[in-house]
Amino acid sequence: MNKPLTDDVSSLTNDMAAIANQRDKQALSRVFDFYAPKIHSFCLASHPGATLMADDITQEVMIKIWNKAHTFNPNTASLTTWIFTIARNARIDYLRKNGRHQSNIDPEFIWDNIVDEDVDLFREAQREKDKKMIAEGLAQLPNEQRQVLVKVYLEGKTHIEAAQDLGIPLGTIKSRVRLALNKLSICIAR
Amino acid sequence: MLNYHPSIELLIDYSAGTLSLAHSISVSTHLEHCAECRRHVSQLNQVGSHLFTGLHMTDSHSHEPSSELNSLKEKMLNNLSADIPTSETIEQAPFDTNTVSARIPRSLHQFIQQDYDQLEWTRLSSSLRVATLCTDTNGSQVALTRIKAGSHIPTHSHTGEEITLVLEGSFSDEGGIYKKGDFISRNASHKHKPVVTKDAECICLTVLDAPIQFTGFFTRWLNPLLRKHHPNGI
């Protein structure tokens, strides 16, 4: 599917270096044009109609990108994945700060990029392979399996909430997810 | 090589950000020890990132941001500081990471500023101490349990789901031997009797949905104590 975007992302990856090293606002502006609509839609996917929240989170994520540009390492994660995880964390943090129940747990220190820290050539090659398998697999995924992943990743639903939304048993949700992961060659034998 | 890992559903919820923060802490701590699960979460993050990339494609609009987003952009660009980020502009951890002991997992740095010894431990028995780290919005409690080498923990069942992650030492029960980094999930149907290995004390991270119930005849007296220390305690 989103094949033509690859070139955009590689020129934006260069923009990230310009943001980090030259504090280039034009570069940030290009990153904004490409990613802000996605971040905005990502927020509206979990909270339809909450445009103020979406504006706040979009701005928050862009400022994080500006401030943390020097920590972005294209060898350990793609720019899109890096920004996706920032947006995901910002959405969690927004809900934590504005929710009915407060919590003293700061999500920033829970995720903290642990996952994409492994830097060695083997891991890099593995990551490239994973990337290809996942992109190809997602494009061929049956709609009912894709739908469940969209519920979980974009709409922020738990497996139980996804089951309620779609009116199907929890077991069916779990098996669709497992089938989907199998097709994406994410083999987790447990 | 670890033998006990979070379920795939937990890893997905963690990667999608739908897992409660209390449970996310236990998954993060496991990830620090487990390269295999790190790879899986990295793959799962890529799945999320691909779906995220496809997002605006579903809108009928072109690639250009809407006028609302453009005004948001102008406002943001004008407010940006052109300085190279310093310790003030980058969010700083509200604690000094230099003082934290190297054995404390990074996911727990926000709660443990020095070492396990400096926490406020409550003695539940001569061999068992607990220290609460935090409570999540849904009432789940994150705590550390510290058990003396060679001790038996009284038989107990759980009233909710309990996650145990071994931080130091090891213990065993009917299901196997659990070592540093192992992730064990138990629900209300389990009734188990863990034993700590003789060579060293065992420190575990626990995430509790609801208080543990001790079921042994001589250990029932512990229940009121546990309830008292659990925010959901009745």
Image (cartoon, helix red, strand yellow):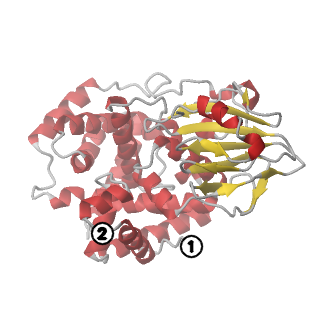
Find residue B38 and name its label: none
Marks 2/1 same chain: yes
Q: Secondary structure at mark 2?
A: helix
**Residue A119, placed above or below residue A40:** below
Comparing A28 with A106, the one in front is: A106
- Is residue B73 positioned above or below B30 on the image? above
Q: CA distance from mark 2 to mark 1?
A: 21 Å
Mark number, residue A146: 2
Location of residue B3 by image quarter: bottom right
- Please give the residue where the numbered disc 1 appears in the rendered image: A189
Say which chain tag 2 marks.
Answer: A
| Closest to the observer, B181 or B207 | B207
Q: Position of residue A153 (x, y in %)?
A: 34, 56
Mark 1, chain letter? A
Image quadrant for the N terminus of chain B? Answer: bottom right
Residue B2: where, in percent of width, then height?
70, 61
Residue drawn at x 25%, y 59% is: A165
In the image, farthest residue toward the top:
B88
Image quarter of residue B191 = bottom right
x then y, percent, for residue A113: 51, 46
Q: Is residue A96 left or right of residue A58?
A: right
Disc 2 marks a residue whose amino acid type is Arg
Q: Nearer the viewer, residue A190 or B156?
A: B156
